Amino acid sequence: MARLQANEDAAYDELVRGYHASMFHVAYRMLGDSNDAADAVQEIFLKVFRNVQRFRGDSSLKTWIYRIAFSEILNRLRWWKRRFRSSTVSLDDDHEGNGHYIHLASAGPSPLQVLETKERETAIQQALTKLSGEHRSIVILRDIEGFSYSEIADILGISSGTVKSRLARARADMKKSLARHLSIQGMDL
Amino acid sequence: MRVQSNILCEAASELMSPFIDSMVSVDEADLLRSHLSNCTPCRRQLQSFISVRNVIAGAEPLPVPEDLQLETRVRLSHARLHNRRDRWQAHFDNILRPFAMPAVMGVMLTLLGFGILLGGLSTPRQMAAEESHGVFDAGIYQPPSTPDLTLRRLGVSPDLDNALSVQSELNTTGMIDDFKVIAGERSPGVDRWLQELVLFSQFKPATHWGLPVRSRIILSFVTVRG
């Protein structure tokens, strides 16, 4: 962080190299579109740069970057909501023009496994998209990114109790959305 | 509403999500376990919570666009460059602006002071004019002088009862252009003697910045008897 605050070129290169993929993942999971996600990632790093002098070290660098990321992403979602833009993800929008292929090693999975993986990804993304922005953030941060409740509270600026209750609600909603997929997979509901 | 163990199924359901994240207290965990041991639907529900979490956690990491990292670095680099330039510009302005006017005034006053002190604003001709009014700068100005301590006596010098003072105007070659007696008695003999003296006397002219200029000199004569 000291090197970032000293505006070192190498420090910014390391930052982008270390975080651009995870930023893209959360942005894509939240926004549902790879172009929007890529644009959001660039804006996130610009905001990191603009705010780096204000960082006081009261949280980890990772948590601080995620806080900026979710602030930017949730602002975008609100902006779209105000303009009545549809936030659903088309099932046909998956892989050819949108860039989020599921690349599996050619020697590994069978066509059936590829299909199952593809279906699961689509189901997860659709279920996430049905959640509100606040609930979606919490599910992504907890179940995909693996943050603790207190870190999520810090990132989103809410209490740990709120994280707990929103996560329970979001998982219950996810369970309903994924019911068909889970039953096909033979999982108990 | 089923009542199982010490808590209701609704309360058990609320504990399930934090339970699978190990975010419940020991007491809450015991209550839930106790409830689950007697409630099959809740056990099934907990299992589904775990399944949902595992499905979400097993989401494949998405392939990142190849040029995203490069584009981000380029955009960031541009922003940093602009920011650095703007900051230097602002820094430069903030420092220089308060000093700009005093600095300009200081330079002008210094130049003016040096000009006055060194007489750099005056030409030799102006200097001669100033000298003729008794105003000159002694620093750079060298007064006229004579190579000989005593002027050569030409012809027979008159006997002078009193000292004779003569104001002479020297030109740039050191010759006397004009003179007038300012003290002492004049007579035809004295005037003739003075004219001879003026005609043949050679002085070292006054100089200003090394250049000869017109000057004024006062000569005094006394008769020494012995």
Image: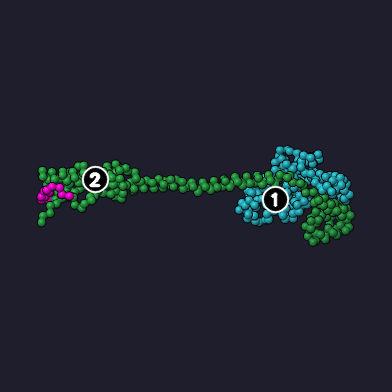
Chain colours: A cyan, B green
Q: Nearer the viewer, residue B74 or B167?
A: B167
Q: Amino acid at mark 2?
A: Gly
- Asked if the stretch drawn in magenta spans residue B22, the answer is no
Q: Pointer 2: what residue?
A: B174
Residue B46 in picture, x, y percent from top left? 84, 54
Q: Nearer the viewer, residue B65 or B199?
A: B199
Q: Which residue appears farthest toward the top when viewing the image?
A: A84
> In percent of the image, x 71 and y 40: which residue is there?
A80
> In percent of the image, x 73 and y 38: which residue is there?
A84
Horizontal side of B40 relative to B21 (left or right) equals right
> In percent of the image, x 74 and y 54: which residue is there?
A147
Q: To which chain does the residue with label 1 belong?
A: A
Res A91 seen here:
yes
- Per the model, the C-alpha gap separating discs 1 and 2 is 88 Å
Q: Pointer 1: what residue?
A: A17
Horizontal side of B223 relative to B143 (left or right) equals left
Compared with residue B6, is residue B108 higher up or lower down, i.e. above or below?
A: above
Residue B146 in picture, x, y percent from top left? 22, 50
Q: Amino acid at mark 1?
A: Arg
Residue B161 in picture, x, y percent from top left? 10, 50
Q: Which residues are magenta?
A: B152-162
> In percent of the image, x 60 and y 46: which residue is there?
B81
- Asked if the stretch drawn in magenta spans residue B154, the answer is yes
Horizontal side of A15 relative to B18 (left or right) equals left
Q: Mark 2: few, some, or many residues within 10 Å (few <14, many ≥20)?
A: many
Q: Main secondary structure of the magenta part?
A: loop
Residue A95 in picture, x, y percent from top left? 79, 41
Q: Nearer the viewer, residue A39 or A79?
A: A39
Q: To which chain does the residue with label 2 belong?
A: B
